[in-house]
Each structure stands twice: as structure tokens, then as C-alpha cells.
Amino acid sequence: MDPAHTTRHARQVTSYYDRNTARFLRWGKDEGTFNLHGALWPPEVTSLNAAMHYSNELVAREIERCPCPVNRVLDLGCGVGGSLFYLGRRLPQIRSFTGISLSPLQINIARQRVPVDQKARFHFEAGCFLQLPAERFKADFSFSIEAFTHSPAADVFFGVQASVLPHGGRLAIIDDCLSDTAHTAEISARQERLLDRYRRNWLLPGLRDLTALKSLAEEKGFRLITDQNLTPFLRLGRPRDRAISLLVTCLGPLMERDTYLKSLVGGDAKQTCYLEGLIHYRLLVFEKRAADAETCMT
């Protein structure tokens, strides 16, 4: 990992979210949930509110499946706290929730939303999830929703989590992965440009294929225990999406001069990548392997 490159990239991501978060909350369709990730529509979901929270619900279910007691939860790329506040309501037995974001603006918003009687339970800090002091951020379960692919160093990410989690602790990632088609097959120059437009405008150096992620995780002592393709639960090509696609077609590179319009260009490329099978939206759960006689902490 080149420290200079990582620092420069972190500044770019910080600026991206500091400038765009208010716009995402104002103009996005989050149904007041304060989630900055996409909606998922499995068959049982019938409302936008539930669709916006479905990723959070998947995390809650994974926490409930943990063989180890979970008292401390760590959100890696917490946005304005939408996921943690959902989990706090959904899992009242958990005593501590900590969120990390590169964006000081997002952290300030999250802190303002902590209920007065929950100040000791919710903690939000501005920082980089590649540089977490292990003793301060110990957790029993950690997760990242649509933040992992911002990381320029997946090996460091898994290494940090190995120092934070106990043996038997789990890490959930909900994010995009390159498909086998994009990784192993010959794709066209147009599709290469499409992937580049998505990566460049959404600042995603960590967009990788599943095989590479499994290998990097295993090197740091994790094994993949769950892999669920969530792409069928996305609603693609909505009227808003079609309008944005038309705007991108008309204005093209001019939109990349503005921070918010860049996000629309990247989002349009992302939709096409899904439709052409170049990327998949996945739930991945990794478990930190126990060493010899070591077991879950109680």
C-alpha cells in the first residue's frame, strides 16, 4: 500500500461525501431512513421504507446467527448512522454500536441524531477504517455496506479487521463485486470503459472479483461462510434512472466537472454494469478462524 496514494484517495472520498451527503439526503429516495445505500426488493418487501432497510435487516440476521455473543458492533463506513440506528432498535440487547466515516460532516449529522438516553450506546468517529487502533475499536461483529469498495487496499482492510475481531467473530460486507464475466472473460472495449466510468466517478479502487477477495481474506485468517447474490433484488431502469441516463447521454463528460453530477454519471454506469452482468451486488460474510484451542469470548 502506497501511503501517499492512500492518503490522497482518502481526501478525495472525504471531499466527495462532505460535498454530496446533504444532496443525497435531500434528493435521494431514502424514505426518511437516513440510509445512503440502495434499496432491495425481495418478494416479501412491499414498501420503500422496508426496501431501504433490507440491507440493515440482513446484517441484523447475520448478527443473530453468530455463534459468539455479540455485544459490540462496528460499522465501517457508517454514513449518517442509518444502519446503526436501525440495528439499535432491532437488537436492543446489544450494548455498543460504533460507526466510522471519513466524512466529518456525516459524523456530525450522526452524532446529532443519537437519542439523549442512548449517548452511551452509540459512538461515531471520523477516521479511516484502514487505520483503526485495535484496542479502541474492538468489536464482536463488524460490517460495511457500500463502503468496502472505496478501499484502495483490501489486504489492509482484512488485516485491520483481524486485529479488531475475536476468533469466531464475523465481518459482513454488502457491496459490488466483479462478475466472472468481467474478471475472466474477454469483454469489449466499451464494457472496459463502462467499468472505468463507474470506478472513476464513484472512487472505487476496491472493486474486485470474489475469488480475489476470498484469497485476500484467507491470508488474514478469515474464511467465507456466506455468499448471497442480491442483484435480483435491485430495481433497475426506474423512470428516474432513465432520466439520468438521458442526461448522461446528452451532457457526457461535462457532468464530471461537478461533484454531485459525477455521482449520477457513476450511478448510470453502475446500472448498465448490472444489466450486462459485469458486476453483482453481494452479501459476503467472513468468519475469523479460531486458533487452536481459542474460542469465542463471552
Image (cartoon, rainbow, N blue to C red):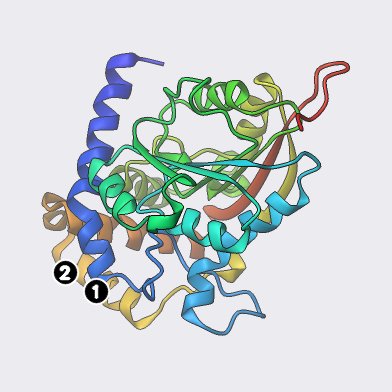
Q: Quadrant of residue 271?
A: bottom left
**65 with respect to 56 (left or right):** right
Q: Quadrant of residue 238?
A: bottom left
Assign a secondary structure to mark 1.
helix
| Type of amino acid at the residue the image marks with label 2 | Cys
**222 with respect to 150 (left or right):** right
x, y percent for residue 72: 60, 40
Residue position for label 1:
246
Assign a secondary structure to mark 2.
helix
Residue position for label 2:
250
How many labels were placed on the picture? 2
Whether residue 252 is situated above or below residue 291 in the rendered picture: below
x, y percent for residue 255: 15, 57
Q: CA distance from mark 1 to mark 2?
A: 6 Å
**225 with respect to 72 (left or right):** right
x, y percent for residue 33: 41, 69
x, y percent for residue 21: 25, 55
| Type of amino acid at the residue the image marks with label 1 | Leu
